[in-house]
Amino acid sequence: MTRPVELPANQPRQFYRGGAAIAALRGEPSADYGPEDWVASTTTLFGRDPDGLTRLPDGRWLRDAVRADPLSWLGPAHVASFGADTALLVKLLDAGQRLPVHCHPSNAFALRHLDCRHGKTEAWIVVGTSGPDPLVYIGFRGDVPAALVDAWVSTQDSAAMLGALNPVAVKPGDTVFVPAGVPHAIGEGVFIVELQQPTDFSVTLEWRGFLSEPEAWHLGLGQETALECVERSAQRVSDLVLRTGTSSSANLLGTQADPFFRADRLHVSGTAVLEESFAVLVVLEGEGTLDDLPLRRGSTVVIPHAAGTCTLSGDLVTVRCRPPLPT
């Protein structure tokens, strides 16, 4: 593959409400349970293969196409570091209700207990909000003993779990870095472009009222083992949240995210040249072209490394998402 490819919506069914903001961005009808659009995904939902995978216009799964020709899709330096693995999952996520308090395993935990090289560090780029008080919740406000976390989960004390987190008011242009293990939740009315490591591993501490099968919260590991992945130390919001505004930015997430993924916001009025790289492009505003591919508000595009340098033309605001730098 040597040309950028526009991708349709890919919204596997989820347990929570949302999707209206995705539909408005794309200009397409909303689904009742379409709060996540998995863009250029080579990742499946946990235990639900092939749900979540992106299908290319020629009928192939993107996962299979990358495995068949990793050098064209990813480039030699990336393949040398990560193999035939994009090392990236991008989502559009529209929270139509508050998400439960949850966290994700680290690389070391995932390798030890889930036989996977990737955990799930993630980051959120806020691109829209609705309602009077759009909030996210990130990290414990103070150190929390293991026994207390265990008690909260055993009794499903939602008020205590949510109350222990840092509430953060957000607006478009804000970004939030969420290291593996750090408990978090996204509030109703928050619309994000999410970058994450390419897994669907979630330890759902607050499962009552959210998951139809209570045992699903711990990834089949049991409560004692699953809770080992929780980061119980206090988190400083200033270390995790950046207020980037809405101007063009070459690095939306800060250097702490570089080992996991990279993102920049591009404001184009005329032309801009993109260096060669595997990338996922999300168009937030305007219209134009990527080389000869027409773009409009809501377009989502996967760019293979073999496309080389590409030219964005027109009046556009886009978010470009890329894998970690090769090591």
Image (cartoon, rainbow, N blue to C red):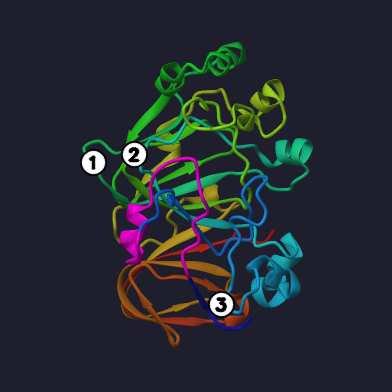
* Mark 3 and mark 1: Cα distance apart in space: 37 Å
Q: Tell me which segment is drawn in magenta.
A: 8-29
According to the picture, the residue beneath numbered tag 2 turns out to be 188
Looking at numbered disc 1 in the image, what kind of residue is underneath it? Gly
* Screen quadrant of the N terminus: bottom right
Q: Position of residue 152 (x, y in %)?
A: 53, 15
Mark 3 burial class by Cα count in 10 Å: few <14, some 14-19, many 20+: few
* Mark 3 and mark 2: Cα distance apart in space: 33 Å
* Mark 2 and mark 1: Cα distance apart in space: 8 Å
Q: Which mark is residue 131?
A: 1
The answer to whether residue 14 is magenta is yes
Circles 2 and 1, Cβ within 8 Å, touching? The answer is yes
SS of the residue under disc 2: loop
Mark 1 burial class by Cα count in 10 Å: few <14, some 14-19, many 20+: few
SS of the residue under disc 1: loop
Q: Is residue 107 left or right of residue 270?
A: right
Q: Position of residue 146 (x, y in %)?
A: 61, 15
According to the picture, the residue beneath numbered tag 3 turns out to be 57
Looking at numbered disc 2 in the image, what kind of residue is underneath it? Glu
